[in-house]
Image (tube, helix red, strand yellow):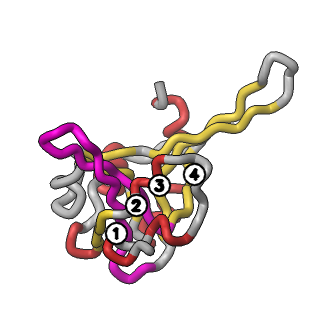
Amino acid sequence: MFRGLLGDNRCLVPASGFYEWRRDSRGRKTPYYFRLKDANLFAFAGLYDVRRDAGGAPLATYAIITTAANGTVAPIHDRMPVILRREDEERWLGGGPLPPETVRSVLGPYPADAMEAHPVSSQVNSPASDDPFLIAPLEEEA
């Protein structure tokens, strides 16, 4: 589905972190917030496309590429978004097809020892919630 986009439609998706949910033995899900330990912004590897809607107006879309979970994410989920290392961002954006060995090296899991995670409020499940406390560790929630 995305093979055609890999050649010339690569993009960066800026982020400060991401959420994944752990399911317990009773089926309840607890959200976790993942970020880089240095708390810097980073970029997910993405692919974009621009199509036309029924009226002919451009409709831009993108997808974040996922990969196998690293040691930090694996206890919570079996996959994670591809976080690009700074030195790989320019290679990812470069025009034209990437050699398969470059794709494999760039799209692997981010180093687990550079990441951290903590449980957060279940209020992240509501699209109406938009507050900085949503990334705060659960024990700090007011």
Magenta segment range? Answer: 16-39
Amino acid at dot 1: Leu
Comparing 16 with 137, the one in front is: 137
Q: Is residue 98 visible?
A: yes
C-beta proximity under 8 Å, tags 3 and 2: yes
Which residue extends farthest top? Answer: 54
Which residue extends farthest bottom? Answer: 38
Q: Secondary structure at mark 1?
A: helix
C-beta proximity under 8 Å, tags 2 and 1: yes
Identify residue for label 3.
123
* 3 or 4: tag closer to the N-terminus: 4
* 3 or 1: tag closer to the N-terminus: 3
Mark 3 is surrounded, within 10 Å at the Cα level, by few (under 14), some (14 to 19) or many (20 or more) other residues, namely some
Amino acid at dot 2: Ser
Q: CA distance from mark 3 to mark 1?
A: 11 Å
Mark 2 is surrounded, within 10 Å at the Cα level, by few (under 14), some (14 to 19) or many (20 or more) other residues, namely some
Q: CA distance from mark 2 to mark 4?
A: 31 Å
Comparing 23 with 106, the one in front is: 23
C-beta proximity under 8 Å, tags 3 and 1: no
Q: CA distance from mark 4 to mark 1?
A: 33 Å
Q: Is residue 140 found left or right of 114 in the rendered image?
A: right
Q: Is residue 101 visible?
A: no
* 2 or 4: tag closer to the N-terminus: 4
Amino acid at dot 4: Cys
* 4 or 1: tag closer to the N-terminus: 4
Residue 75 placed where, x, y %? 16, 54
Q: Secondary structure at mark 4?
A: strand
C-beta proximity under 8 Å, tags 2 and 4: no
Identify residue for label 1.
138
Mark 1 is surrounded, within 10 Å at the Cα level, by few (under 14), some (14 to 19) or many (20 or more) other residues, namely some
**Residue 82 sits in quarter:** bottom left
